[in-house]
Image: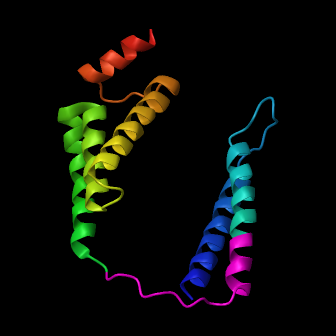
């Protein structure tokens, strides 16, 4: 039942998204308008959520083992980390603040173990910085570590 409700909700959201994007001017491939990307994403979402909805409605419910009980303290810790992130971002700048929050969240979720969580958090932060700050030119809070990475770029 949960999968069916999720599938119907996603399909309805997709319909609303597609309607919102349909009103924008499409443009051409050489000179795309503001509606080109939303319309393509909406059509892709419509296809994928339609398939998911069809699978959810036609597939028989499988009996699964009982999931472990919810732990509200995990949700509270994750929400706290998200709320503290802007403050850390102000004092520690992008790389250190993002690394601290991502590593903390992975530890709280008991993802792969402390060492793997460290490697994953570090890789995620470096890739995020390279993609957003260097690749896309997004203005992030910059400190000494970020300056070193900008200088390595040339």
> Vertically, is 115 above or below 64?
above
Residue 23 visible in the picture: no
User: Residue 88, percent across and down?
Assistant: 20, 41
Residue 64 within the magenta-colored segment of the rendering: yes
Determine the residue positioned at 32% across, 16% down.
148
Does residue 135 lie above or below 81 as drawn? above
Q: Nearer the viewer, residue 125 or 25?
A: 125
Q: 132 and 126: which one is in front?
A: 126
Give the camera-side residue of 77 and 107: 107
Is residue 9 magenta-colored? no
Position of residue 15 measured from the top left corner of the image (x, y, whole percent): 68, 67
Q: Position of residue 32 (x, y in %)?
A: 75, 35
Number of marks in picture: 0
Which quarter of the picture shows residue 2? bottom right
Is residue 65 left or right of 47 when viewed as pictured? left
Seen in the image, is 151 located left or right of residue 35?
left
Coloured how? rainbow
Residue pictured at 57% horizontal, 77% vertical = 6
The reply to whether residue 93 is visible in this rendering is yes
Question: Start and end of the magenta stretch?
Answer: 51-69
In this image, 92 relative to 55: left or right?
A: left
Residue furthest out toward the top? 154
Q: Is 14 positioned to the left or the right of 100 in the image?
A: right
Q: Quadrant of residue 72?
A: bottom left
Quadrant containing the C terminus is top left
Which residue occupies 21% across, 71% down?
A: 73
| Residue occupying the point 73% across, 57% down | 44
Q: Quarter holding the N terminus?
A: bottom right
x, y percentage for residue 5? 57, 83
**In the figure, residue 74 lies in which quadrant?**
bottom left
């Amino acid at each position: 039942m949960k999968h069916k409700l999720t599938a119907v909700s996603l399909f309805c959201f997709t319909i609303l998204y597609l309607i919102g994007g349909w009103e924008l001017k499409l443009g051409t491939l050489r000179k795309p308008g503001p509606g080109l990307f939303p319309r393509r994403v909406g059509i892709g979402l419509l296809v994928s959520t339609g398939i998911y909805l069809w699978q959810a409605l036609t597939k028989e419910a499988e009996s699964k083992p009982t999931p472990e009980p919810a732990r509200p303290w995990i949700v509270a810790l994750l929400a706290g980390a998200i709320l503290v992130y802007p403050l850390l971002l102000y004092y520690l700048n992008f790389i250190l603040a993002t690394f601290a929050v991502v590593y903390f969240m992975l530890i709280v979720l008991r993802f792969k173990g402390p060492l793997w969580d460290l490697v994953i958090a570090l890789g995620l932060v470096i890739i995020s910085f390279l993609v957003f700050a260097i690749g896309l030119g997004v203005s992030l809070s910059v400190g000494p570590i970020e300056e070193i990475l900008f200088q390595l770029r040339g």
